[in-house]
Image: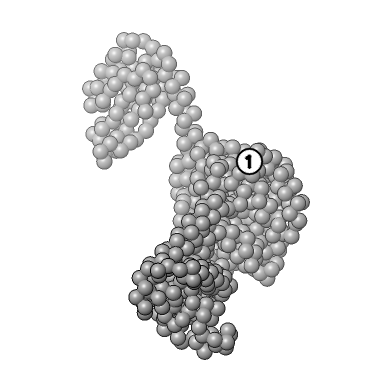
Amino acid sequence: MWTSDLTLMMLEGVRDTLLMTLLSTFFGYLLGLPWGIVLAVTDKTGIRPNAVIYKALDVLANILRSIPFLILLILVMPLTRAIVGKTTGSIATIVPLTIAAAPFIGRMIESSIKEVDHGVVEAAQSMGAGTFTIIWKVLLVEARTSILVGVTIAIGTILGYSAMAGVVGGGGLGDIALRYGYYRYKALIMIVSVVLLVILVQIFQTFGMRMAVKLDKRK
Amino acid sequence: MAEMIEVQGLSKTFETDEGRVEALQDITLSIEAGDIYGIIGMSGAGKSTLVRCLNFLERPTAGTVRVGGKDLGAMSEAQLRMIRREISMIFQHFNLLMQKNVIDNICFPLVIGGMKKKDAKKRAQELLEIVELSEKATAYPSQLSGGQKQRVAIARALAANPKILLCDEATSALDPRTTQSILQLLKEINRNYGITIVIITHEMSVVREVCSHVAIIGEGRLVEQGRVSDIFAHPKTAEAKELILKGSGTERRTLEDRQRELMKGKSCIRIVFSVNSSFEPVIANMILRFGQPINILRADTRNVEGIARGEMILSLPDDPGVQEEMKAYLTERGLAVEEVNGYVD
């Protein structure tokens, strides 16, 4: 039967999932934003082509993105222990989540920036704008809507990954669904956890897209 | 007058996957301060590359570009960025920041030049008055028409008080009437602020409208340059002739209006020469035979189903008897004759 303890557990699950997702997204962008910017800028069509830097970041992104998340979880355990001090729980899960999210976010940033009309960049160059000015005042501003849509996608994806971390005791709703629903055959708990995950994704998706549309001045 | 821009032996070669492309070869030209200088050529002639060499957005493979006596090729990246603030540019597709409103777009070159936001806004307001768009200050580019966008782009280009304004096909995306108003604005700017203007275009009418000098570019080479009036009157090269013929649109329209007036109250006929009838000088013979002058209102050749046909519109003498005889004379010689009352295109 459903008890108040279970309700409390579910609420904690929601809290942990939100914590993992949002912090991982934040750290993911801390790494992925510069990663994507450098990829877009150093590509041969970019404003500062540099084949060596581009190739290095390109290959690293491909390697990290091709490792299945469950394997990555286990591979980075030593690093997780070094940073957080333990390998289980939602705080520890932030480390592999960030590492998985960063190259994926970098790719999305790269593609968002490459969508910016080259003519606008050329106009800025003709006014004497330098590389950093163009990045901050042209590329990121013009790509704003696309980047925000990317954030929405990233949050949804990271939320899904965070649930996967339940397999190794990662905490959050995924952990609950797995431990109670799968190992102990408590179908109800599993269903409730999954429904809560769906609702969370829905909220982020709706909110993110609304923001993106509202901030888009191209209409 | 002092030379504002001097281009010496400029060449530009692109290395592409398909091999070397020689976009520009050995271009030498000089543009005087305060001039409105046209650079005209067919698309693909290399004129857009040439204009980008004038502010070193494209670095020439060979040759020198001097702006105000300073050699751009000898400058560092930082020095180039500084001198680019004196060389503004406007574009075919306006290239405004779509996510920024009109005022912020105009402020952009000022802010990157280090001006305080408040002062920049004040200056932007002044510029909006010059281009007559004050009421659109807080609009976004997507809410403006093409002509309005180009006005904003011009205001933005003028913001940093440039010495030179480069216009890369600035009117090519605009309808004829808007093109007129933008060209008038450019003329005013040239007159009121003494800014040297370089206009890149493929339309002869644009050059004729505003430019004092013109350079004709064909296949990456400078084929002809000089005063617009001279080149228009005596084009020396095939490229120049072709461009002038193509660009005669406005001339023709006024000519047609005149023809319409001439035809009023006159008896006019339209004759069409077929292939066989072009051997004999029919009109000349007819005038000799009747001893009466006729007025040729229009003569043209046109392609009808792949065959070139000559067409003429003649205004005949007032005597109805002579008119009938002339028509008969022409018909006898195998020409198609029809009476025209209004103007037939």
The quarter of the picture where residue B132 lies is top right
In the image, residue B77 lies at what x, y percent? 66, 69
Q: Is A189 left or right of B32, judged from the image as shown?
A: left
Q: Residue at x 33, y 30 (%)?
A: B311
Position of the C terminus of chain B by quadrant: top left
Q: Is B212 left or right of B263, judged from the image as shown?
A: right
Q: Toward the viewer: B341 or B99?
A: B99
B341, above or below B202, in the image: above
The quarter of the picture where residue B148 lies is top right
Q: Which residue is mark 1?
A: B136
B298, above or below B238, in the image: above
In the image, residue B61 lies at what x, y percent? 55, 69
Q: Toward the viewer: B179 or B136?
A: B136
A218, above or below A208, in the image: above
- Under mark 1, the amino acid is Lys
Q: Residue at x 30, y 38 (%)?
A: B303
Q: Residue at x 29, y 35 (%)?
A: B309
Q: Residue at x 66, y 61 (%)?
A: A128
The quarter of the picture where residue B315 lies is top left
Number of numbered discs: 1
In the image, residue B111 lies at what x, y percent? 71, 57
In the image, residue A8 lies at what x, y percent? 51, 69
Q: Is residue B154 visible?
A: no
Q: Toward the viewer: B9 or A210?
A: A210
Q: Is B233 left or right of B75, judged from the image as shown?
A: left
Label 1 residue SS: helix
Which chain is home to disc 1? B
Q: Is residue A202 visible?
A: yes
Label 1 neighbour load within 10 Å: few <14, some 14-19, many 20+: some
